[in-house]
Amino acid sequence: MSQPLINQTANTITTGDKLASDAEHEKQNVDYESQTRFEEDDSTIEGDPDLYLQKEVEFESAHDINYRNCSWQKTAGLLFSEYICLAILSFPWSFSVLGVGLGLIVTLIVALLVLYTGLIVADYCAAYPHLTNVCDIGQHLFWGKRWVWHLTAICFVLNNLLIQSLHVLVGAKYLNTISDNTTVCSVVFGVVASVICFFVSLPRTFSHMSIIGIFSAVTMFIAVVLAMVFAGIEKHPFDWDKEELPIVWTAWPIKGTTYVNIMSAVLNIVYTFVGQVTYPSFISQMKNPKDFKKALWAVTLLEIALFSLAGVIVYIYVGNNYITSPGFGSLSLTYKKISFSFAVPTIIFLGALYSNVSAQFIFQNIFSKTSIHRNSHTSKGWIVWGGINLILWILAFVVAEVIPFFSDLLSLMSSLFDCSFGFFFWSRAYFKLKELYYFKLENRKLSVWEIFQRSTLVTKGEIILNLIIALIGFYILGPGLYATIQSIILSYEADAYGKPFTCVSNGI
């Protein structure tokens, strides 16, 4: 799909010695620590990327805590755990708004766009291996300004915090559902979910987290399959006896579907696919970052199949009149409890994973790369590490109680953060990679128009595609955010949500 970009970037890395001038050869011998600095001319970095990675692996292998030891298989496990998640069960609701036909079209388009931009992320991290998280990349993409780093950091932590909050909310929903709760305050269940997630988030490297992640991905896969099977074999959906309305489904949006509902449905799909915000963090701990693409291709193929099947099958058997988000709520009570229970490891782990990503980012900005507290098992290091995670989970619990809704929370996160972390960041990265390619060839920066004029027909198409990707990002931030806010307002007016810090059961 993006073969010209991939080949050109690979040539930049693997044949750099042939293209570099004598001055660039001289730069390969610079001091290791100086390679992490941002350059005023950010079209290049000091040194050779492969040499930098080799020294990184050697540097980390000498420490008690080795951050650069994750294989592509373990990274695939992290990606599977990130994507095979509870949000898959929001697809039936999205399909009920969009219809099966439009729902499948949107699913495929979003999946391919995320795959394409994910390949750009991988190429960018290969070309600039000193950038270890999305905040570094944000600064590097936009003029090297430190305020861009700080702004990106705020959005990065908030994005992850909202995902943590979502899992606190869903954890409380599960405990209320499975217990048929009528006596325990729901706030208590939120505390229980937060505490469990806190302890799971404590491993210090992604290599260790991946072991739990693979297990959670497998159990969530089972939960989704069971939800599809149960939707097909049950006589009637949940609450059918109260209404006895017919089970109907449509191929396209029904007449009168509002713009707000359509955008909410699309944003739910976008949220489930968009996860590029974690890619640089995962790549920064891989032994061979170039293998990241293997993991990305594997998870994307499974995503397209599983997300589409879950959306279509559950929606068709449940129908417009009984659909819920997540889709577990549409199943009869026994089936709901069984399938929802298999989702518990994901409810716990995925929230813990995003806490871990944020905690590592904060921790590695508190302690320098050579600090003993960062690289060894010191008391101070573990106290700070545990304290960061504890604070993150306290904040996540508060947010979960203040924003007690599931589907609209997915849309809110998508419109606020996926616009940049999913789309126009990587459109900008594509053009930066093209600038780097021509800089290596001619030792000068070319404008986008000059690059367009020199490009082949296929590359011209890629340039136009990346401009469209940037526009999609801005559209999600503008009209998308408006639609989400309107949906939340309408839901509150209809009394569809509980009150903050309520003891009332939020079971499905």
Image (cartoon, grey):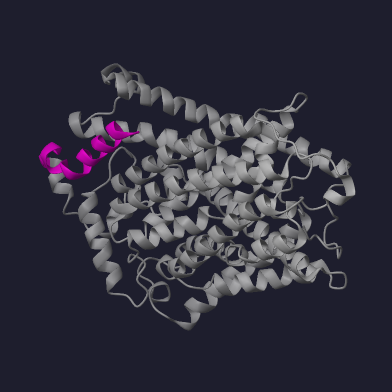
In the image: residue 144, left or right of residue 346: left
In-image side of 468 versus 247 (left or right): left
Looking at the image, which is closer to me, 162 or 35? Answer: 162
Residue 51 placement (x, y as % from top left): 20, 55
Name the residue: 59% across, 55% down: 224
Residue, far top: 453
Whether residue 267 is visible here, answered yes or no, is: yes
> Could you tell me residue 88's position as x and y percent?
59, 49
What residue appears at the point 67 percent right and 41 percent down from the top-left corner?
316
Residue 219: x %, y % from top left: 54, 64
Residue 172 appears in which quarter of the rendering?
A: bottom right
Q: Residue at x 29, y 25 (%)?
A: 446
Say if the magenta span includes residue 15. Answer: yes
Q: Nearer the viewer, residue 164 or 230?
A: 230
Rendered location of residue 175, percent (x, y): 74, 68
**Span highlighted in magenta in the image:** 1-22
Q: Residue furthest bottom?
A: 379
Eyeballing the image, is 416 above or below 258? below
